Amino acid sequence: MMKVSIVIPVYNEVQNLKKGVLDTVLAYAKSRPSVIEVLIVDDGSTDDTVALIKKNYLGNYPKLRLYEKKHAGKAYGVIAGMKQAKGTIVFFTDMDLATPIEEADKLVQGIEDGYDVVIGSRNSNRQGAPIIRKAMALGFIVLRTLLVGLRGIHDTQCGFKAFKTTAARTMLKKLHAFAKESAVEGPSVGAGFDIELLFVAQKLGYKIKEVPVPWRHVETKRVNFITDSIEAITDMTRIKWNDIRGAYN
């Protein structure tokens, strides 16, 4: 049985903590012997996120770990989690649990079946998402295909992914657009991170599987679809340029 690390990047998540989402994740971890840790990576929260985790959870749940870092955006929170994970499988999800945590079973099974990367795919199953956001998502896919390619992958942006830990760490060493962490102000998702990670995975010849998962729209201050899309387009342009100059070879 492979050992699973669940990584959750957080930034100012008091509202979600009060909803009990961490309780849900910890209950899931307790019920799965393969899950050896829930690693919360705090990306320099400025509210009471860390204080609440330390007061109400840390020390009471053996599988829970907290890693604190300076604020650099969600992408670097995920990167830190991948580097710190102790399991042979590293799985990451968002704190809002837009996709139920139980769906992680499908992704873990995919890794155990021999895939290096298994990603959740929302496809057209975007429950509650405004029409304009669905339309912009389709436009984003077209643009991503033209700029970067990523053959056979439909949904790069779903924050629900699993990796063989050894593969994940090899992939991180090959990143260029997200090779160097730098401080940011306010919420930042690093929208192009998933794209570069999967682009590198294909360059390395890793086996990738896309698994349909349910997803419900959750409004969050951390995500701004317009500004995140602009950021992603900028990142994709950088990835394309890096590829042209042979940086990923």
Image: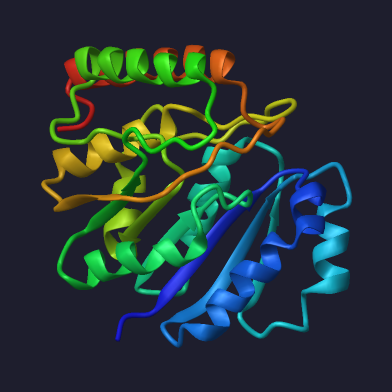
In the rendered view, would you say 122 is above or below 87?
above
Determine the residue positioned at 38% across, 52% down.
161
Closest to the observer, 184 or 142: 142
Quarter of the figure that contains the C terminus: top left
Q: Kindly indicate the quadrant of the structure image that contains residue 198.
A: top left
Could you say where residue 178 lies in the image, as x and y percent from the top left? 44, 33
Quarter of the figure that contains the N terminus: bottom left
Determine the residue positioned at 49% across, 18% down.
131
Could you say where residue 140 lies in the image, as x and y percent from the top left? 36, 17
| Count of numbered circles on the image | 0
Q: Kindly indicate the quadrant of the structure image that contains residue 121.
A: top left
Q: Kindly indicate the quadrant of the structure image that contains residue 248.
A: top left
Tell me if I can see residue 1 in this picture.
yes
Give the colour scheme shown.
Answer: rainbow
In the rendered view, would you say 210 is above or below 114?
above
Could you say where residue 117 lies in the image, as x and y percent from the top left? 25, 54
Tell me if I can see residue 238 in this picture.
no
Q: With 216 as the anchor, is 72 left or right in this view?
A: right
Determine the residue positioned at 62% across, 21% down.
224
Closest to the observer, 247 or 84: 84
Could you say where residue 4 lies in the image, as x and y percent from the top left? 41, 74
Closest to the observer, 20 or 221: 20
